[in-house]
Amino acid sequence: MTTIKVLVDWCGKNYAAYIYDASIGGAVLTTNKTFSGLQKDTIESVRFQIEGCLQDGDQLPDDIKSGNYKLVFEKRISALLHEVQQYTTLSALSRVTGIRQSQLSHYANAVSQPRPMQRSRIIEGLHKIGEYCLTIV
């Protein structure tokens, strides 16, 4: 089975997914207001891309031709922070992680991307907030 990586960002008003993978004949880009809608649209777009490549006579790997592939959606920090803002605030995340709220806002709005260490701190901070919420009785 072939795994195809799908990068997901938040782009102001929509989620955006993009793939560049030679095994499917190039690039696919989709947008949607919801993450679940984005997943559905991306799956359809990849199928459409593959069908088009096959109709054009392009050579694709056997796994791709037979549908033996899976899409793995990887949310970048902008998409992740947008999604969790329905449960917590950047201010709370700032207090837990020690990362300035203004910097978190830059990440949330895709103005800049965190280094891997910063990304880990953000994920750990979200886990701490979740763990705390689970202790509430």
Image (cartoon, grey):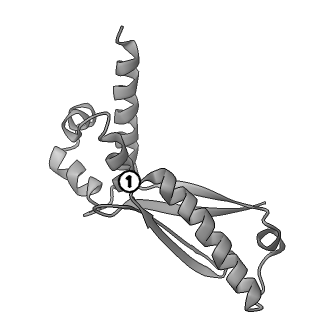
Near-viewer residue (34 or 112): 34
Answer with left or right where residue 25 lies relative to residue 67.
left
Which residue is at the far top?
137
Image quarter hosting the C terminus: top left
Crowding at dot 1, Cα within 10 Å, few <14 / some 14-19 / many 20+, comes out as many
Q: Report the residue at 78% width, 86% height from top.
A: 59
Answer with left or right where residue 31 lies relative to residue 56.
left
Q: Report the residue at 41% width, 17% height from top.
A: 134
- Where residue 113 appears, x then y in whole percent? 32, 60
Q: Secondary structure at mark 1?
A: helix
Q: Quadrant of residue 32?
A: bottom left
Count the numbered circles shown. 1
Answer with left or right where residue 6 lies relative to residue 81.
right
Near-viewer residue (28 or 123): 28
Q: Quadrant of residue 23?
A: bottom right
- Where residue 36 appears, x then y in whole percent? 50, 51
Q: Identify residue type, mark 1.
A: Ala
Which residue is at the far bottom?
56
Image quarter hosting the N terminus: bottom right
Relative to 120, residue 43 above or below: below
- Where residue 76 appears, x then y in whole percent? 42, 56
Q: Report the residue at 76% width, 71% height from top.
A: 64
Relative to 18, residue 121 above or below: above
Q: Which residue is mark 1?
A: 79
Q: Report the residue at 84% width, 73% height from top.
A: 62
Answer with left or right where residue 109 lies relative to residue 80.
left
The reply to whether residue 58 is visible in this rendering is no
The reply to whether residue 96 is visible in this rendering is yes
